[in-house]
Image: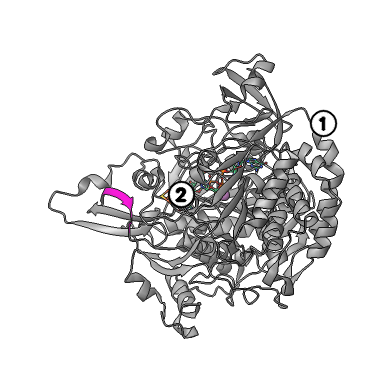
Amino acid sequence: MTQANPAERATETTPERTHFRACNLCEAICGLEIRVRGTEILSIRGDDADPLSRGHICPKAVALKDIHQDPDRLRKPMRRTADGWEEISWDAALDLAAERLVAISQEHGAASIAAYYGNPNVHNYGSMTHGSRALAPLKTRNRYSATSVDQLPHQLLAYWMYGHQLLLPIADIDRCDYFLVLGANPMASNGSLMTVPDFRARLKALQARGGRMVLLDPRRTETAEVADAHHFIRPGTDAAFLLGLLKTIFDEGLAQPGKLAPFADGIEAAAQAIGAFEVEALSVHCGIPAETIRRIAREFAAAKCAAAYGRIGVSIQRWGTLSQWLIQLLNIVTGNLDREGGVLFPQPAVDMIDSPASKPGHFASWKSRVRGLPEFAGELPVAALAEEILTPGEGQIRALLTSAGNPVLSTPNGAQLDRALDSLEFMVSVDIYLNETTRHADLILPPTSALEHDHYDLIFHVFAVRNTARYSEPLFDKPEGALHDWEIFEGLGARIAQRLGVKHQPSPRPDQIIDMGLRSGPYGGMRKHPLDLSLTKLKQQPSGIDLGPLLPSLPQRLQHADKRIRCTPPEVLAELESFASELPEALVDGALSLIGRRHLRSNNSWMHNSARLVKGPTRHQLLMHPQDLAARGLLDGSAVRIRSRAGEVVVKVESSDEVMPGVVSLPHGWGHDRSGTRMGVAQAHAGASNNDLTDETYLDRLSGNAALNGVPVTVEAA
Ligand SMILES: Nc1nc2c(c(=O)[nH]1)N[C@H]1C(S)=C(S)[C@@H](COP(=O)(O)OP(=O)(O)OC[C@H]3O[C@@H](n4cnc5c(=O)[nH]c(N)nc54)[C@H](O)[C@@H]3O)O[C@H]1N2
Ligand SMILES: Nc1nc2c(c(=O)[nH]1)N[C@H]1C(S)=C(S)[C@@H](COP(=O)(O)OP(=O)(O)OC[C@H]3O[C@@H](n4cnc5c(=O)[nH]c(N)nc54)[C@H](O)[C@@H]3O)O[C@H]1N2
Ligand code: SF4
Ligand SMILES: [Mo]
């Protein structure tokens, strides 16, 4: 695997060229300007001409080169043998995968086959267009993805309230006057469910206009440093704070839905249910003074335009869906939904929402076999994956396909899943690394690197703070014999169909699908738009096309047939009752509360093999408040043992008043010391996995999303 670096081969006389493309590493989708000579990457910088990112990049962009050139990155299919891994041909690999999957399915039924799709699928448009085609002929309902350790509450609410799982209102940061943020750290994450490249500059502009940003986070983060106000909030108690805001707004007659009123149903029912709470009691629960809650409510309601936004800290917690609902409601009752400077629905050039192929969603149409967790849009919560593998009986999972996912490090009680994967009859992974998850596979199918295929952001334009469109050509030719992710899915699906004797309709290529989407989309010729967008047109402007700021679109954009907003889904009202009855109980909890942490130079679990990114001070230590260290007689810098119901890990502790007393913070995505992986740099910077502590039984119960923040733990000297 230590082949000579192909980048060395270019000579001085090879001409230089400049290539423009989107960075595929995070949701900010920054435009890049990459200078190359032959196959050598000379530089990667921000593309000033990109109408969305305007030259912004972060340190991870340069690591695209490291991943591309990484000698540890897999380039050929590999089969596990008694003597270790063996490279095999693509034909042999796809045949083997199809043969084993079909055999197991025929012997044990469709449910015995499962799939897990990880986060990078969403950053790879061929995986978006073709990912589900791999196993489609097998008709399994055992599908899982990173959605249920991430944004499931948002999608469920969007489906219930606005009629489509992707119809999420996006904060119009470029025109907003008052920006209320809960549980997000865009200075490190570069934004999520809010494609917002160069958050810092956009916030500065907001502040220069006289606007304010108020942040609620149990940690004084990098984003807290640039906000106008930061308030510590006890993990998992955002619902109490938000109820306090809404209670104040309703009590003081500040609710003004304005133009939304004629098509917004259920505000009265919400007001009535929220009226039963007391701001003082809510204040004790979340740790924010009642006067502060009331003041923020009045400021939010009084602002000419305001946006409330909550992300991972609010999504992956016990009350994720309830809290995200309260955020939606706050925007609606103050008339900030569909208001310029408030929150608006983007109008992407390829419309994933208003198109014939669109999938609005469905909820609880079936349940997981062992625990009865609800499906959403055809997927079951990944917190149930290990038990579905480990529990015998009809419908037990016996074979698994993973695609661009590392659930051993990214899903709750990863150690349990680690054991479960060992017991599978067959596992195949479409992945570029031999890591903590794929080490369990019988077969690994590595696709081309991101720089070797073309790209269009099907998803992130749907969540962007400005309407733009951009197509990226491949930077490098695909190596001889290599396959793109979508070709692997297509090849596998075709072979499975052939073995089953069912028809496999060949699919158009991803770029053909995009071209069709552009032509038939809102700026396309088929809708008689003057821009007459098509792939050919986009190719002429590799830095992208500006389609303007977000615009009001209601009620037309709503996807419920009656074009109304369902402000108060009955399921959420029931959850509110559960919250009210658990409110006093939560207070007596004396344990420490574990939260995560993201760093600008890291990306979930899979970029720790870039020496450039992991160098410097350790970033995977536990942060703990000095009072909590003193109370346990622990020393700054010492090794500590963290225990939860699910497991334990030993890590170094750092004294830090960044975290509030009672809260400890450990990033996820580390724990690279497991044997049998092939990621040398990551192994040398192993850390411990946060998800060996998180608990597969601790959920946002309404949606089934994992509650990975606010996990009760104890900490002692190791
Ligand atoms: N550099 C980098 N960028 C990334 C990623 C990465 O790993 N590294 N991952 C990408 C992905 S997949 C995603 S989904 C996004 C996520 O994007 P963000 O949501 O912005 O991510 P985080 O930095 O985890 O911010 C969550 C914040 O919530 C806080 N928090 C924890 N618990 C609670 C709580 O109960 N209430 C409140 N109010 N706050 C709480 C945490 O302290 C943290 O500051 O980032 C993306 N971008
Ligand atoms: N405790 C805790 N846990 C969390 C979170 C948290 O905040 N706290 N955040 C959660 C969130 S938001 C997310 S999104 C999940 C992420 O969870 P996952 O998606 O399961 O994990 P990743 O670390 O993103 O792993 C990505 C995998 O894709 C592979 N890969 C990278 N690029 C490609 C490609 O182009 N093609 C293919 N085929 N493979 C590729 C990598 O090698 C790696 O194996 O983690 C979640 N887990
Ligand atoms: S912010 Fe995200 S999209 Fe932009 S350069 Fe960094 S990793 Fe890439
Ligand atoms: Mo995520």
Binning the other alpha carbons within 10 Å of mark 2 as few (below 14), some (14 to 19) or many (20 upward) gives some
Q: In the figure, is residue 554 to the left or right of 68?
A: right
State which mark lies toward you, 2 or 1.
Answer: 2
Quadrant of residue 260 within the rendered picture: bottom right
Seen in the picture, residue 370 relative to 665 is either above or below; the reply is: below
Residue 556 sits in quarter: bottom right
Residue 163: x, y in percent?
69, 69
Give the SS element for disc 2.
helix
User: Is 697 or 423 nearer to us in this picture?
Assistant: 697
Q: Residue 570, how many percent across, how many down?
A: 82, 62
- Earlier in the chain: of badge 2 and badge 1, it is 2
Q: Mark 2 points at which residue?
A: 204
The quarter in which the C terminus is drawn is top right
Q: Main secondary structure of the magenta part?
A: strand
Q: Is residue 505 left or right of residue 285?
A: left
**Helix, strand or loop at disc 1?**
loop
Between 145 and 549, the one lying in front of the other is: 549
Q: Which span of residues is magenta-colored?
A: 42-48
Callout 2 amino acid: Lys
Q: Residue at x 79, y 49 (%)?
A: 371
Q: In this view, does 628 lie above or below 387?
A: above
Q: Where is residue 442 in the image (x, y as percent from the top left)?
A: 54, 46
Front in this rendered view, residue 440 or 610: 610
Q: Where is residue 656 in the image (x, y as percent from the top left)?
A: 57, 25
Density class for disc 1 (Cα within 10 Å; few <14, some 14-19, many ≥20) is: few
Q: Do the residues labelled 2 and 1 touch (CB within 8 Å)?
A: no
| Mark 1 lies on residue | 588
